[in-house]
Image (spheres, grey):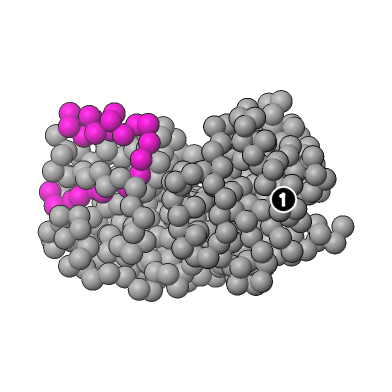
Amino acid sequence: MKILHIENGRFFYGGPQQVLYLCSGLNDHGIENILICQPESDLGKIAKDHGIRVIDLLCKGDLDLSFAFRLFKVIRNERPDIIHCHSRRGGDFLGGIVARCFDIPAILSRRVDSLEFSFLTRIRNAIFVKVIAISKNIYNILSLSALHLDKLVMIRSAVDSQRFLIAVKKEEFLKKFNLNKDDFVLATVGQLILRKDHQFLIDSMVNLRKLYPQIKLIVFGQGQLNAKLKLQVSELELKNSVIFAGFDLELDNYLSHFDILVHPANAEGLGVILMKAGAAGLPVVAFNTGGIPEVIKNGETGLLAEVGDRYTFESHIDRLISSEPLRTKYSLAAKDYIKAEFSLQEMLKKHIQLYESICDE
């Protein structure tokens, strides 16, 4: 069986990481993979290091016909059994259309939780034989659209829990981010875009720093709001408390050394970073939205506030800072929960079963 994957994300965010997990696991099971990526993408570089065959194709969006033509030639030469589209920006729409030209079944992994009824959405729904929802939240949303339910399947994203059993030394962590051993360090991870709501979190740091002068917030990610957020930090005189670390491919190595992961997103399909935090034993404060409650069990593995409730969000952070036993309780519970509910083995098994069922039709 040969699977051709299409993932057009440039940076190694949650979606591309899931694609790497999947392709690596399929390789281990003797299933041939070809991965179509953007040139110079993080995923392409890392996938090559993992022994995955990568073909770089530039894609500028849903209407990039030059990408469609080059993809046509790749598929004509490779003749895969299934085409698996993992991303937007042409990776789904054009990938599905070109697959139809060869009468090759195409499937789509849906990672966003917005409800769409556009013309392109109806076409996408029609051209794929299966659509994979990566969370129960997204499954429920897609079930409300024009998508036929017999096309819809849920395969949750997963995380490699074993990856977080090995961490760098605390001294190396402190040196890397220029921290003192007495600092209480929050981390937030995600694209610097509106729905991640970093503005909300930075505003909250004003009150939190008054309570805890040694508090630090490290912001990981890149995006269109980068300059605006840095200006906000400057205007609020938080430069000594908020650190912008950009996109760090080595972040997994340091996760267990942070004190709390704060995730202020007001919309989230599932949240790979939340699964990683749980696997690393890092307590989480987040909002009760989208697929987040599937990962964070409020009062059991972390703390959730309702979207926009700044008082409760800050109170949750305050509560965790002031109680090391509570942080330890959530840390241990989260490790067990993530290992049980979001295993790589289960994610891989369900994908293989889906591929085999499609090939047998």
Which residue is painted at 17% across and 28% down in the image? 235
Which residue is painted at 62% across and 56% down in the image? 34
Which stretch is magenta? 213-235
Closest to the observer: 82 or 115?
A: 82
Q: Where 147 sits versus 169, above or below?
A: above
Q: Position of residue 3 (x, y in %)?
A: 69, 57
Magenta stretch: includes residue 225:
yes
Q: What residue would you read off at disc 1?
A: 77
Q: Position of residue 133 (x, y in %)?
A: 65, 49
Closest to the observer: 152 or 125?
A: 125
Q: Assign the N terminus to one quadrant of the image.
A: bottom right
Q: Assign the C terminus to one quadrant of the image.
A: bottom right
Q: Position of residue 319 (x, y in %)?
A: 28, 55
Magenta stretch: includes residue 212:
no
- In the image, is 217 to the left or to the right of 4? left
- In the image, is 209 to the left or to the right of 29? left
Going by the numbered disc 1, the residue's amino acid type is Asn
Secondary structure under the numbered disc 1 in the rendered image: helix
Closest to the observer: 4 or 241?
A: 4
Please tell me in which quadrant of the rendered image residue 323 appears.
bottom left
